[in-house]
Amino acid sequence: MCGIIGIVSDKGNLKERIIEGLKRLEYRGYDSAGVALRKENGIFVRKKKGKVSQLEEELREVEVNSRVGIGHTRWATHGEPSDPNSHPHSDCTGRIALVHNGIIENYPQLKEELRRRGHNFRSQTDSEVIAHLVEEEASRDDFLEAVRRAVNRLEGSFALVIINSDEDALYIARKDSPLVVGLGEGESFVASDIPAFLPWTNRVIFLENGEIGRLSFSGVEIYDFQGKRKEKKPQVIGWSLAQAEKGGYRHFMLKEIHEQAKAISDTIGPRIERDTNSAVIEDLPLAPRHIKDVLILACGTSYHAGLVGKFYFEELAGLKTDVDYASEFRYRRPVLSPSTLVVAISQSGETADTIGALRKAKEMGAPSLAICNVVGSSITREADSVLYTHAGPEISVASTKAFTTQLSLLYLLAVYLGRERGKIDREQESGLLSQLLSLPSKIEHMLREQEEKIREIGVDLSSYNDALYLGRHLNYPIALEGALKLKEISYIHAEGYPAGEMKHGPIALIDENLPTVFIATESKVLDKVRSNMEEIKSRRGKIISLLSGEHPEIEELSDGVIKVPLVDEYLFPIINIIPLQLIAYYAADFLGHDVDQPRNLAKSVTVE
Ligand code: AGP
């Protein structure tokens, strides 16, 4: 997965704006970065292994007055991170340059064919073949037609932005990788994601699969891959620039953790009818009474949200629910029926495994619902219906506010389904929703009261090599998610486990070098969790507890305690994850890691 941007503007001087856009896209990959700017008699290209800031430094003294340019920030797939493998890639003549996000599956055959025709390749990437293909076609056709013919030969996924040395224009094409056009005054933009050009316009057009286009100062023309003109209406996006910036926080992750109370309010508020306190769900692909069971498909943090969703759907709506890793579901022979509601959960809406699993479920005739944060993303277009989380842009690679908004929406959906299916009455619904509505202020209170304590615990945890996260029932998925957060940003090995399963194996690991984070908030299994704590303590294990209410005996067993406000049992997962996100954040920050852009990762994983 990579981030790409292109700008064509009658105001000129694009270098700074392309770099600024790339910085906003860096969450998509940060192995290398590069720019190409059209100059008077050719194309200036500079690309470099490392982050965008390193490229920026290298370009500091460079003056190129350009009215069209492209940029790329890379997450390496084909070819190691290196200067030659960085984008933009050029043809043999240097008169064409392009940036690509995706994977060209038939590149070995194309490369061989182009080599035989005398083309010279300078990188090991799949992307470079596209520049040479366009070069071949451009020798006999106008440029748009050349791009169209070239993309018709590509197999795999691509979002492409291409420039040539003869004109102030950007050529774009999309198949299975995101691309959004932005329309400004005397200038047009294209990027993998909206925040890249949000400072300059919020009027956007989402490119669909199989579309190709030409951008100029005055706007965009869009065609299908057969060359037929398409009319598309721009949409105005409600995201503000402040949402896409750090707003005084040291990192996006810390800002996004603190935004959770608001993000939850924004997600649930418009879906609760205040007079009656009842749930309003705008769009479902199947009437609630016709749903027989539910299948949730997702990856990573979104998968953990799905595990909590299973409790909600089963216990509040009486619907048998399975949760599958999208990457596993794709290659099984699952049993689905037209009355299985398939729910694909994804922050980005661009995760390749989740898209693949959703397509498979659709092929099998199941109705599908997307729970997604990014407006217009691939998953939202492919699912039969969409419910958006309104978390705003999530920039940090480690997902935080997307998770808690997913949980809030799953809870609300389960309450709605429970009511419509006659499993809960109006009074119960009103009670459950009142609890949900009170959550944001409780989260704010907890952050005010507990953050310093959590910071100390995070710093302390940073001195260990491993950590165990234990929870039961609704909090087992939270143990998984807490461990994932610690792993991905602090690089400390962590394992989430059901507390009751520990005695079947992992207990052998316990000694004074393995701290355990226990999620021990109020629940029907709290006594059992306390017994699991005793088992750890008697083996000299260090214990950190998440507690609600007064439990002196648990405090006694614990080396560190974080107090969480009392909420309804079903809502504890939403509030409990927040201290665990902060523990990971403070541990990683103390260790000096790049919290927002952890090594080897990318925000949305658009490859299998
Ligand atoms: C979470 O912190 C991760 N970065 C990752 O597990 C992520 O949740 C996963 O890749 C799924 O992404 P999605 O929600 O955008 O589909």
Image (cartoon, rainbow, N blue to C red):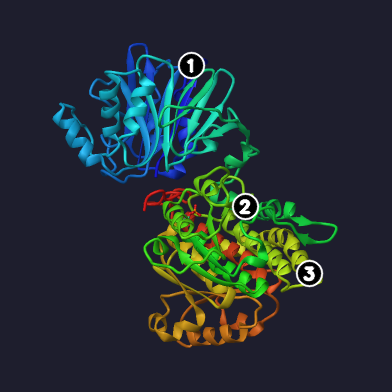
Between 605 and 363, the one nearer to me in the picture: 363
**The image quarter in which residue 416 lies:** bottom right
Question: Which comes sooner in the sequence, label 2 or label 3?
Answer: 2
Image coordinates of residue 470 in percent, x first then y, are: 51, 75
Residue at 66% over, 83% down: 552
The residues tagged by marks 1 and 3 sit, at their Cα atoms, a distance apart of 58 Å
Image coordinates of residue 197 in percent, x first then y, are: 54, 31
Residue at 61% over, 42% down: 248
- Pair 1/3: label in front: 3
Identified by mark 3, the residue type is Gly
**Cβ atoms at labels 1 and 2 below 8 Å apart:** no
The residue beneath circle 3 is 431
> Left of 186 or right of it: where is 94?
left
Image coordinates of residue 592 in percent, x first then y, are: 44, 52
Identified by mark 1, the residue type is Gly
Residue at 50% over, 59% down: 365
**The image quarter in which residue 35 lies:** top left
Name the secondary structure under disc 2: loop
The residue beneath circle 1 is 12
Name the secondary structure under disc 3: helix
Identified by mark 2, the residue type is Thr
The residue beneath circle 2 is 389
Q: Which mark is residue 224?
A: none
